[in-house]
Image: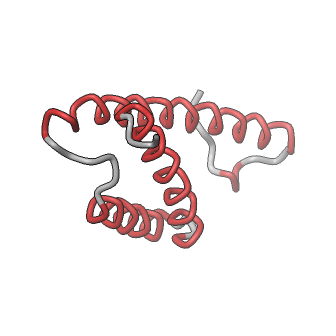
Amino acid sequence: MTLKSPKDIDTMAELRDQIDRLDRELVDLLAVRQAHIDRAAEIKPGEGLPARIETRVHDVLDKVETRARQSGFDPVLARQMWALMIEDMIAREERVLGRDR
């Protein structure tokens, strides 16, 4: 199923169907992102890297904010969402690396 433009949707049922589909796709993509973070936690010790690398955190947040602005998504909200996700992912890495004890 190809997504329609929201302006081309006339019923709430169809709009909700598309929103539900988008939510499923977003969750699937976030699961893939999480798998990449899990792999990072496996690679980082061999490269002597900590879970938190501040320059990388700021770089990711800046890129997300820029992309959100380009895509017409609220850049402040995007940055907040990613900041929350990044903090959780860093905590996840720290648990794997054994540094949260």
Query: What's the residue at 20%, 46% (across, down)?
Result: 49
**In-front residue for pair 87/16:** 87
**Location of residue 99 in the rendering, given as x and y in whole percent from the top left corner:** 38, 41
Query: What's the residue at 22%, 38% (across, down)?
Result: 44
Q: Is residue 6 left or right of residue 56?
A: right
Q: Is residue 49 above or below residue 54?
A: above
**Location of residue 81 in the rendering, given as x and y in whole percent from the top left corner:** 57, 58
Query: What's the residue at 55%, 56% (across, down)?
Result: 84
**In-front residue for pair 98/25:** 98
Query: What's the residue at 15%, 33% (across, down)?
Result: 46
Which residue is most to the right?
Answer: 12
Q: Is residue 92 left or right of residue 6?
A: left
**Location of residue 98 in the rendering, given as x and y in whole percent from the top left corner:** 38, 34
Which residue is most to the left?
Answer: 47
Residue 95: name its quadrant: top left
Residue 65: name its quadrant: bottom left
Q: Is residue 52 above or below residue 35?
A: below
**Location of residue 21 in the rendering, given as x and y in whole percent from the top left corner:** 66, 33
Q: Is residue 7 left or right of residue 27?
A: right
Residue 25: name its quadrant: top right
